[in-house]
Image: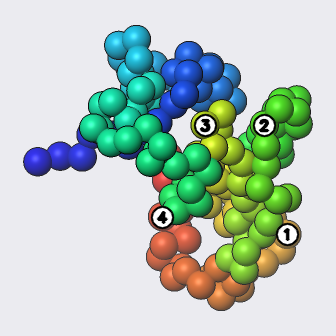
Amino acid sequence: MRYTAALISAADVHVSRRFYEELFGLKLDHDYGINVSFTCGLALQQNFAWLAGVPEDSVAHRSHNMELCFETEDFDGFLKQLDRRPGVRRLGDVVEPGWGQRTVRLYDPDGHLIEVGEDMGMVVRRFLASGMSMEAVSARMDVSIADLKKLLTAE
């Protein structure tokens, strides 16, 4: 058995497809009309209640019980791109938890929560560039030095 995709409900699959392609640069894998899938494993389904065999009113909008997570090496560039899309609803401002990864949360056109975070390797590089030692970065991020080195060499 293998995991194949996360399938989320879309009121209008064409609007949602454009959102993910334009804002996140996702590449289309398959387009079956009311179902599209991207090469990363995300899939969008219009008429989700019909597909799942559940009542239409049971399909939650903005449920806050999961989020799609993305990371980017150009977090500031992503924020500028997001600013050019005033219709995108954000859940608060940019936050930086204790481990130092800057993140922002927003909603897709169907109310699904999305987190976009700074690539973890970039977090390590930012801390090192600020003059912190690997030991200090390890303590700040609560990550072993061996794992920091993996983050620095990850593709």
Instruction: Report x, y in % for residue 14.
Output: 56, 16
Q: Which mark is residue 39?
A: none
- Residue position for label 1: 130
On screen, residue 57 above or below 137 = above
Q: What's the residue type where badge 3 is placed?
A: Asp
How far apart marks 3 and 2 lie (CA) works out to: 11 Å
How far apart marks 3 and 4 lie (CA) works out to: 36 Å
| Residue 131 placement, left or right of 1 | right
Where disc 2 sits, the SS reads loop
| Residue 18 placement, left or right of 126 | left
- Which residue occupies 44% across, 48% down? 58
- Residue position for label 2: 88
- Residue position for label 3: 110
Instruction: Report x, y in % for residue 131.
Output: 83, 74
Determine whether label 4 and label 1 are within 8 Å by CB. Answer: no
Precedes in sequence: disc 1 or disc 3? 3
Q: What's the residue type where badge 1 is placed?
A: Ser
How far apart marks 2 and 1 lie (CA) works out to: 33 Å
Q: Nearer the viewer, residue 87 or 3?
A: 87
Q: What's the residue type where badge 4 is placed?
A: Lys
On screen, residue 143 above or below 34 = below
- Which residue occupies 72% across, 80% down? 98
Precedes in sequence: disc 2 or disc 1? 2
Q: Quadrant of residue 44?
A: top left
How far apart marks 4 and 1 lie (CA) works out to: 20 Å
The answer to whether one can see residue 89 in this image is yes
Mark 1 vs mark 3: give the one in front.
3
